[in-house]
Image (tube, rainbow, N blue to C red):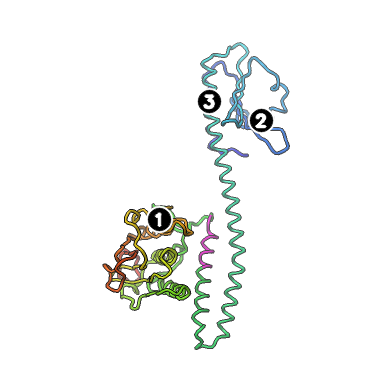
Amino acid sequence: MLLSEPFLALAQQQLSSFEGEAAIARLVLYLAQGSQGAAPRLDAVHQWPRSDGKLPPVELDPALRTPAAERRWYPLRQGDLLLGALRAERHANEDWDPRLDRRLQASAAALAQCMSLDLERRRLLDQLEAQREQLHLLVHQLRNPLAALRTYAQLLLRRLDPDSRHRPLVQHLLEEQAQLDHYICSLDRIGKDTPVIADSGHQALLLPPGLPGRAGVNLQDLLLPLTERAAATAALQGRRWLGPEDWPSWSVSQRAPEDHVVAEIIANLLENAFRYSPANAPLGLLLGDDWICVWDGGPAIAAAERERIFQQGERGSCSQDQPGSGIGLALARRLAEERSGSLKLCCRPRQLDPSLPEEGNAFVLRLPQPAPASAEGPAASA
């Protein structure tokens, strides 16, 4: 296993610090190497004074395997694991000073700690690279069945009459396939030189809406596919769904490309509403004067949990028996704040609009209004 350049520089500094010790003639740092079925060996990785000649492993130098008064070995250990060794040699006419011995022991302990961290770093980097290769292979394999699904849906669409009531279903299949393909493109960018989403000083997020090159959008175009998907899910579950009947003027205004994240926020909120509200509870999406609300008519979330559920990894007591990781709400709020907006929970939905239930859960997203378009094109969101 290779040691990093920063560690080797540190080792050089440590060994060179003994230059003022007149008794020391040579210092050599060894790394313990081993493989399955073979005896471990000690390979030299650095020496002082520095030399262009490469030292052989300890096992190949017979002189090093016999005790000598002028030589001492200081093991580099991490618990019961031998990581390497520090070999110190004194001049023949010098004695081993207890102070020098203590200093060599301290240096060996420090090198052992740094070597342990360096080897662990290398192990994690190798593991990360292996996982990255597996991810890219999986992404490559996913593209084939997705392309086949698109082809079959397109063929089916051609066979349907223009006025067939099944055409919207097939068109929705194509839209969902396109969204999946967009996510796969994002996964394929993991580990590439170009970041998936720009780092604005906050925690970086891997989300397809943040991919570069996307055009501006209005919220109606973003939310309409989500409401259609939600209506289909509600019909399948036999529950009441109320989508927006009127789209306010601010929802059709052109917004900055970064506001694609609104789709991710609302998708997370809708998924939670379907997953955690009772099967007979109504739910829906409503747009107000300057807000978007995803609501359900189920039992209100306990007061003590209404802020805690926005923390990553935290889940409400009523959802403990449901699958999930406690990421959705934390992600949704973080995305809203990234766009200078807010996401809050209201447990009396009717306070927002008379058509909503008196009790339930309403997650309210507010975003800054888009700046008016200039003559040069759509302006970025405030």
Mark 3 vs 1: CB contact within 8 A = no
Q: Is residue 271 left or right of residue 141?
A: left
User: Under tag 1, what secondary structure?
Assistant: helix
CA separation, marks 3 and 2? 18 Å
Identify whether 254 is placed above or below 190.
Answer: below
Kindly identify the amino acid type of the residue bearing the numbered disc 2: Leu
- Which numbered disc covers residue 42? 2
Based on the picture, tell me whether residue 77 belongs to the magenta stretch: no
Disc nearest the viewer among 1 and 2: 1
Q: Is residue 317 left or right of residue 27?
A: left
User: Under tag 2, what secondary structure?
Assistant: strand
User: Under tag 3, what secondary structure?
Assistant: helix
Please name the residue that numbered disc 3 is placed on: 107
For the residue pair 283 and 10, the one nearer the viewer reads as: 283
When asked about the image quadrant of residue 9, the answer is top right
Please name the residue that numbered disc 1 is placed on: 317
Image location (x, y in percent) of residue 176? 50, 72
Disc nearest the viewer among 3 and 1: 1
Tell me where the magenta segment starts and ends, as one range: 180-190
Kindly identify the amino acid type of the residue bearing the numbered disc 1: Ser
Q: Is residue 374 visible?
A: no
